[in-house]
Amino acid sequence: MGNSPITNALTIDFEDWYQGIEIPYSDWDKYEDRIEMVGDKLLKILDDGGAKATFFMLGYVAEKHPEIVKRIEAEGHEIGTHGFSHTLIYKQEPSLFQEELTRAIGFLEDLTGKKVLGHRAPFFSITKDSLWALDILGELGIKYDSSIFPVLNYRYGIADAPRFPYTIKREKFEFVEFPISTLKLPGFTMPISGGAYFRIYPYQVTKQAIKAVNREGQPVTFYLHPWELDPDHPRIDVPRRIALTHYFNLGATERRLKKLLKDFKMAPMGEVLGIS
């Protein structure tokens, strides 16, 4: 029994290519929509790999493409929320965050007939400046969150946050925080969870880092965006710090994802945490 492989959480931040590069929500209708095509590609890869995932659905995408949400749910994946407008939470007023999240959750629940239990913040933007968001998550019935990154980055991070799942308790609610996964090295905390890191590091670095965390007896949360499987999506003029990571090595994602699904036992986050 002790040799059973750790089950890691496979998560998808379900957004289109132009929604994760800090383009204002009000300008989104100017850009080519590719989410249906790349969503189909992603679902086929997961099906071929025998894997189920948690899809943190961006509310804007869900409202525009409700048939995608229905298909994802029908294929046995878990539906969580990624908010509505992919705005950095610490740049929002709490009232607007609550309004948008209520809208996003309500739409998904009406569409699927199931409670939305999981949340991930856009850009992992629950930081020390937006810890107030945790209370709103609890008030709205969220049972697990995966937004806090125990590193420091120009957009996100709480460097001294716990590295492994823990419970956040308030008087009227409690839920589990599943932090974005890291590997503790001498003098350095290494992000290993996926996204751009999955494309920047050689695959063997990611593989060995996940194994190291699993040897600690802990699951990893791995995340990916659909557009990372779409190397032909448009190149536009964005700040260099964004372009360097957004467009880097997109052609490697599909091959590496297929390897990952063979090398590790993966499941939706709710299943890994025993929350349903």
Image: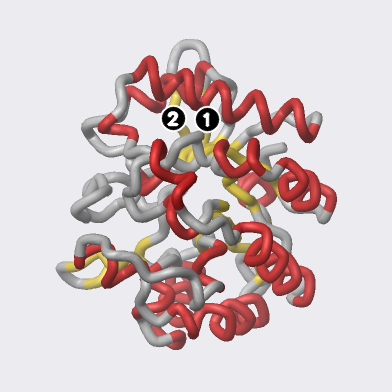
Q: Is residue 15 above or below residue 257?
A: above
Residue 117 or residue 121, whichever sits in front: 121
Q: Is residue 102 visible?
A: yes
Q: Would you name the residue on which mark 2 appears?
A: 168
> Is disc 1 surrounded by few (<14), some (14 to 19) or many (20+) residues within 10 Å?
many
Residue found at x 37% / y 46%:
124
In this picture the colour scheme is secondary structure
Q: Does the CB distance between marks 2 and 1 fall below 8 Å?
A: yes
- Residue at x 34%, y 19% (from the top left corner): 94
Q: Amino acid at mark 2?
A: Ile
Q: Which residue is mark 1?
A: 175
**Identity of the residue furthest to the left in this view:** 187
Q: How many marks?
A: 2
Mark 2 lies on a secondary structure that is strand
Q: Residue at x 50, y 35 (%)?
A: 83
Residue 142 position, x and y percent, is 57, 28
Kindly identify the residue that appears in the image at 80 percent across and 51 percent down.
Answer: 71
Q: Nearer the viewer, residue 137 or 253?
A: 253
Residue 42 placement (x, y as % from top left): 66, 67
Query: Which quadrant is the N terminus positioned in?
Result: bottom right
Question: Does 61 appear above or below 11?
Answer: above
Label 2 Cα neighbours within 10 Å, binned few <14 / some 14-19 / many ≥20: some
Image check: 183 left or right of 107? left
Judge left or right: residue 58 versus residue 247. right
**At label 1, which amino acid type do we have?**
Phe
Question: With respect to residue 146, does 251 lie above or below?
Answer: below
Location of the C terminus by quadrant is top right
